[in-house]
Amino acid sequence: MSSSSKMSIVSLRDLVESAAHKWYKENEKDSMKAKWGRTYNWKELVKEVDWRSLKHDPVIYTDIESPGAPKNHILFRSTFLNDTNREQEYNLRAERRTVSTCSFSIFEGYTTEQCVSLELEVPLPKCVLEASTGFRREYTLEQSKDKQIEEELKWSVESNIKIPCMSQTTAELLVQEDEYHGTFEIKSYFFGEIRVKVYKDSQEVLSLEFGDLEELFPRDKGFRKDAHGLYRITRGECKARFGVSQKVELHAKPLPGADLFLRQSQRNSLDQANELRKNSIKDNSTPTTSVTVLRELINGTDI
């Protein structure tokens, strides 16, 4: 990141405290002794900034790299071996976890310190929400200018796999992941007054109100004004890598010598069939012979 980009990140708290310090030096320091019996060093005092309302326009995204053809990643692989002459069935059960990541980086805009009312709610791009699994719709950018989000996903499969005789089958659980890279822009409007309360040892010693926001947030710090009011544009980038779907692939191949085994099995089966047929013929001819012999005996008997 260039130095010019770093200069475009403005600390709102620094601007407000600078204005409060200037007012303190010019107006209040001389009367502090009369009011409290002593004067205080500005650095010894605790300042609490009470921000007024802030409104954000919808986020505008510009895609640099949209989700395309998902990439396959193997999470689990298992090989089933069947060296028998019969088909076998196995149960495939697997569970794995992956992490989807999304990062936001602000290279132009403002930062705050523990100020909930000025947090940015940044939604994910529509194309990511439609394709991804596991992300929430939007994330909050607090006082920092960078944020990394990780969401854990669980992938599981349970299925029965039939393995032909004399073969091996490799089952793979694959997760399809995609990526996104784009820039975003948010216009934030500032309204109302900003109050600064100053404390010494938990006792409030001073309260200031700043109503002229144009003086407080000048143009040379990147603030602008339009018909809706005073605003500051925040620009940044979003990068995401996320899971899309899962699938199971089966890769089967015969074992070495499987062809010879199959030919021998076919030959044995043919031999067994021929033997069964011969036995069947013998079994069918026996009753005929017995009847003939009996008939001859009857015919040859004297009455």
Image: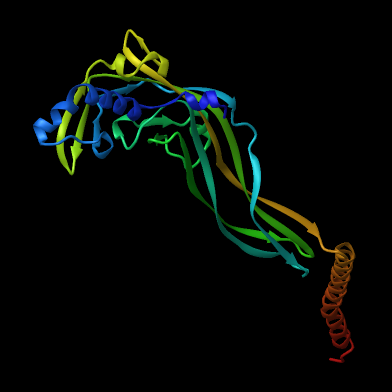
Lateral position of residue 250 relative to residue 262, left or right: left
Give whichever of 220, 104 is nearer the camera.
220
Colour style of the rendered protein structure: rainbow
* Residue appearing at x 19%, y 37% in the figure: 199
Q: Is residue 229 above or below residue 173?
A: above
Give whichever of 237, 200 is nearer the camera.
200
Q: Is residue 105 above or below residue 90?
A: above
Give whichever of 133, 91 is nearer the camera.
133
Lateral position of residue 55 relative to residue 220, left or right: left
* Residue appearing at x 31%, y 26% in the figure: 18
Q: Residue furthest top?
A: 227
Lateral position of residue 137 relative to residue 158, left or right: left
* Residue appearing at x 48%, y 25% in the figure: 7
Q: Quadrant of the C terminus?
A: bottom right
Q: How many marks?
A: 0
Q: Is residue 260 above or below residue 62?
A: below
Q: Residue furthest bottom?
A: 302
Give whichever of 236, 60 is nearer the camera.
236
* Residue appearing at x 84%, y 83% in the figure: 290
User: How far from the left and from the top, in percent, is residue 238?
Assistant: 52, 31
User: How far from the left and from the top, in percent, is residue 222?
Assistant: 42, 17
User: How far from the left and from the top, in percent, is residue 68?
Assistant: 63, 31
Place residue 17 in its image quadrant.
Answer: top left
